[in-house]
């Protein structure tokens, strides 16, 4: 059974637009809001490997 991700953990996917690879999309979970919904932030980059300073919130 897969485990849930903690805050500030996320995922990386290939990002396509009009069936053409445009780069990589990183989605991280920031926190849960007052109603219990996830608050997420997305970053778009040309390369898969990004400087970790980007994720310093």
Image: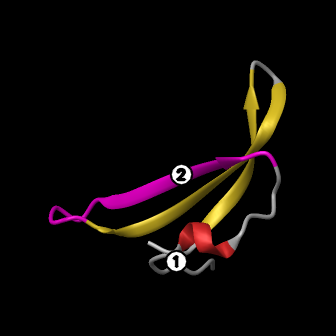
**Badge number at residue 42:** 2
What residue is drawn where x is 28% and y is 59%?
37
Q: Which residue is mark 1?
A: 4
**Badge number at residue 47:** none
Residue 32 coordinates in the image, percent (x, y): 29, 68
Instruction: Residue 16: name its quadrant.
Output: top right
What residue is drawn where x is 55% and y is 75%?
9
Q: Residues within 10 Å of mark 2 (few under 14, many from 20)?
A: few
Instruction: Residue 18: name its quadrant.
Output: top right
Residue found farthest to the left: 34
Instruction: Residue 21: name its quadrant.
Output: top right
User: Which span is picked out in magenta?
Assistant: 33-46
Q: Quadrant of the C terminus?
A: bottom left
From the viewer's perspective, is 23 left or right of 5? right
What residue is drawn where x is 73% and y is 51%?
13
Q: Residues within 10 Å of mark 1 (few under 14, many from 20)?
A: few
Marks 2/1: CA–CA distance: 19 Å
Above or below 53: residue 45: above
From the viewer's perspective, is 57 left or right of 49? left
Work out whether residue 53 or residue 43 is closer to the camera in this orientation and state it.
Answer: 53
- Between disc 2 and disc 1, the foreground one is 2
Q: How many marks?
A: 2
Residue 55 coordinates in the image, percent (x, y): 55, 70
From the viewer's perspective, is 23 left or right of 36? right
From the viewer's perspective, is 21 left or right of 54? right
Work out whether residue 29 or residue 52 is closer to the camera in this orientation and state it.
Answer: 52
Residue 29 coordinates in the image, percent (x, y): 46, 66
Above or below 7: residue 27: above
Q: Is residue 51 magenta?
A: no
Residue 50 coordinates in the image, percent (x, y): 74, 64
């Amino acid at each position: 059974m897969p485990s849930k991700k903690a805050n500030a953990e996320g995922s990386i996917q290939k990002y396509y637009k009009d069936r053409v690879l445009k780069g990589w999309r990183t989605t991280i979970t920031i926190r849960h809001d007052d109603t219990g919904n996830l608050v997420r932030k997305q970053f778009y980059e040309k390369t898969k490997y990004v400087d970790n300073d980007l994720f310093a919130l």
